[in-house]
Amino acid sequence: MARPARGLLDKRLVFVTGKGGVGKSTVAIALALAAARAGKRTILCEVAAQEHLSEVFETNEIGFHEVEVGDNLWAISIDPEDSMREYVLLQLKVKPMRDLLFKSRIFTYLAAATPGLKELVTIGKIWELALDERKSADAQPYDLVIVDAPATGHGVGFLQTPRTFAEVAKVGPIRQQAEVLDAFIRDPERTGVAIVALPEEMPVNETASLERDLAGQVGLTVDRIYCNGLYPERFADDEIERVEATLPEAGGGARAALRAARTEHRRAHDQRLQLARLEENCEAPVSSLPFLFEPELELEEIEMLIEELAL
Amino acid sequence: MSSVAELLADKEICVCAGSGGVGKTTTAAAIAAGMAARGKRVAVLTIDPAKRLADSLGLPELGNTERQVDPALFADAGIEANGGELWAMMLDSKQTFDEVVREHAPDAETRERILNNRIYQQLSSALAGSQEYMAMEKLYEIHAEGRYDLLVLDTPPSRNALDFLDAPSRLLQFIEGRALQMFMKPTGFGMRVFGRGASVMFSILRRITGVDLLEDLAEFFQAFSGMVGGFRERARKVNDLLSNDRTSFMLVCAPQGAPIREAVYFHRKLKQAGMPFGGVIVNRVEYGDEREERSSAAELGDLLGDSELGARVSANYEDFLALAARDRDNIARLGHRLGTDAVIEVPYLDHDVHDLAGLAEVNRYLFADSASERAAIAAAV
C-alpha cells in the first residue's frame, strides 16, 4: 500500500503534532538534534510563545529571529503578529503603503479578527524557512525545518488552515498563497508529519482519530507515530508473582520497594496493551520511546532518546 | 485539611482549569460523581469527546444536552448515591455558536446571513476563543435554568489555559470591530468617517487579500455587528457569574516542572481577573514512602529468596524515589507560591482511570479530609 516514504530527516519540513502533555516538544527537540548531528542544517520552530525551547537550550534569546543553539542547529519562536508584518512587507514593496497600513486601526482589526489568519501567516513563515530560496533578506536556506506544532484540541485545525483559506477565498493573493502552502504541506516528498502519543487509553484513541482526520480533511499521510514514555519491562510475570506473594509479610521500606516493583510491572503491562491498540488502529509505523526515570528532561536526557527515534 | 467536598460545600459552579494532558476531564468527572454521591444534583460539562468515559457513564454518547447517568451504575460501582444525581453533557461548540446566533440575531435575515456566510461556516470554530466562549455560554445558560445544585465545567484544552477567562471580552472586541464594518462600506458612512484614507486602505488591503475574501469578511462582520448589544450584556453576566463567591476555580495540574509552573502562572492570572480560587489538584503524584527505613538490596534479596531479583527491585525503587522526591519538592513549591494549603494530591494509580469505579478510586483521595489521610490510603493499597 503506502509506498516507501523518504525518512523523516530527508524531508524539508516536519510537523511534530499530538495532544497536550504527551511530550511533543521533547520529540521535536530529539528529532532536531538527530538531524543536526547527521550534518543537516536544521531549524527548530516553536509556535506561539511556549518558551519551551528557551528553557531547554538555556537561552532567553529565542524569539522571532533565527538563533544558533548548537552545531548545525538553529531555533525560532514564531509569533503570528511578526509573521503578519513580514507577510505584508513581502506583499507590499512600497514603503509608504506599508507604513500607512501598519498605522491603521483597520488593519489591526482585520489582522486580529479574521478567523484563522494567525495560523495562516504562521504556516506561511514556517514555509518560508523551508524554501530553497528564502524570501527574507540575507536568509540562508535550511536542510530541515522541524516544527513543534500547537497541541491539537479537536481535529486538525492548524494544518488545515491553508486548505480552508484556499477554499474560502475564491481568487486573489491570499488564495494563491494558501494554495502554495497547502500544496507544500501535502507534498510527502517535502513535508512529513509525526504524531506523538502516550500508551494510554485516551491518547491512543485521539491519535487514531487525528491520523484519520489528517488524511481525510487535509490529505496528509502521517509518516510516523511516536509512542512516548513506555515503561521498560523490568520484571517478568513470575517474578512479580513472587513479589506479590512476599508483600503481605514485608514491612516498612521493603514493602514500599516491592510495591514499586508491582507498580512498574502493572504500568509496563497496561501500556503494552495500549501500544498494541495504537499499532492496530493506526496506519503509520509506530516507534516507542522509553520512559526515562529522570526528574526533569533537560538536553542531556533528551539526547538519550535520539537513538530510539528509528530514523 | 482540604477536601473537595469542603471546598465546594456551598458552591454552585466548579471550573476545572489547567493545561492539556493533566487529567482535567477525569478530575471534572470524578468531582461531579463524588458530589452526586453526597446527595447533590450535579451536571458535568465536558468538551472532551472521551468515548470510553461516556461508555462508562452508561451514555451511548455525550451530546449538546445533558443526560442523566443511570443510578444503577453507581450502585454497581459500589457508590451510594444518597439521593444525588449525576448528569453529563459534551459541549459542541459549533452547535452552541449556532444557537447563540439564533438567539441574538435581531431578525431572521441577519440570522440566515450569518449562518450561511462562508467565513462563519468554515472558520468560526477557529475564531479566537470561540470554543472557550461557548463553554462559558452553555455554563451560563444551564446555571440560569437552575436545575442543578452544582455544575462542574471541564475547560477546553487550550494552548493557553487562560483563554476562556477573557474569551467573552475578546469575542466582544471582535464583533465590536466597528471600524472594520464602516470601512467595509467604502461609499457609505465609513467614507465620511475615514475619508480618503479608507479607500486607499481598501485598495491596499485588496492587494494583499483579494476582493472576494474582503467581501465575505465584510458581510461576516456586518452581520455580527447587529448582535453587539446582546453579546455585551451576556458577556457581562457571564463575568459576574464566574467571579461571584458561589463559583470556585479548581486548578488541575501534574507534578512535573512545566505543569507546576503553568499552575503558578494560572493562579496569578485568576487573582488578577478577580476570580475565586478554590484549590489545586495535583494528579499522578508518585509516592515513595520516605518515612520508612530503606531496605537494602541484600535484605530484599533475602526476603524474595533471590538476590538478583532483590537487586533489581531495589534499583527500581531508587528510580521511583527520585521521581517521588521531585514531586514532593514541586508540590511544596506550588503550595508555597500559591500561598494555600488547599493542595490535593492524587497518586499515580497503577491502572488508567476510565470508568465509574476508577472515578470512585480517584475520589478516595479527592474527598479525603487531609493530606495525611490521603497518604495513609495510598500506603494501604
Image (cartoon, grey):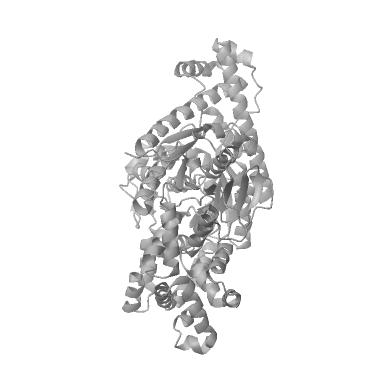
Q: Position of residue A236 (x, y in %)?
A: 47, 19
* Residue B292 in view in this figure: yes
Q: Quadrant of residue A58?
A: top right
Q: Return the residue found at the far bottom.
A: B192
**Residue positioned 50% across, 84% down in the render:** B199
**Residue positioned 54% across, 61% down in the render:** B165
Q: Quadrant of residue A29?
A: top right
**Residue positioned 61% across, 61% down in the render:** A137
* Residue B9 in view in this figure: no
Between A2 and B330, the one lying in front of the other is A2
Image position of B217 with respect to B146: above or below: below
Image position of A214 with respect to A293: above or below: below
* Quadrant location of the N terminus of chain A in the rendered image: top left
**Residue positioned 65% across, 21% down in the render:** B294
Q: Quadrant of residue B51?
A: top left
Between B41 and B357, the one lying in front of the other is B357
Q: Position of residue B342 (x, y in %)?
A: 61, 47
Q: Position of residue B60 (x, y in %)?
A: 30, 47
Image position of A237 with respect to A20: above or below: above
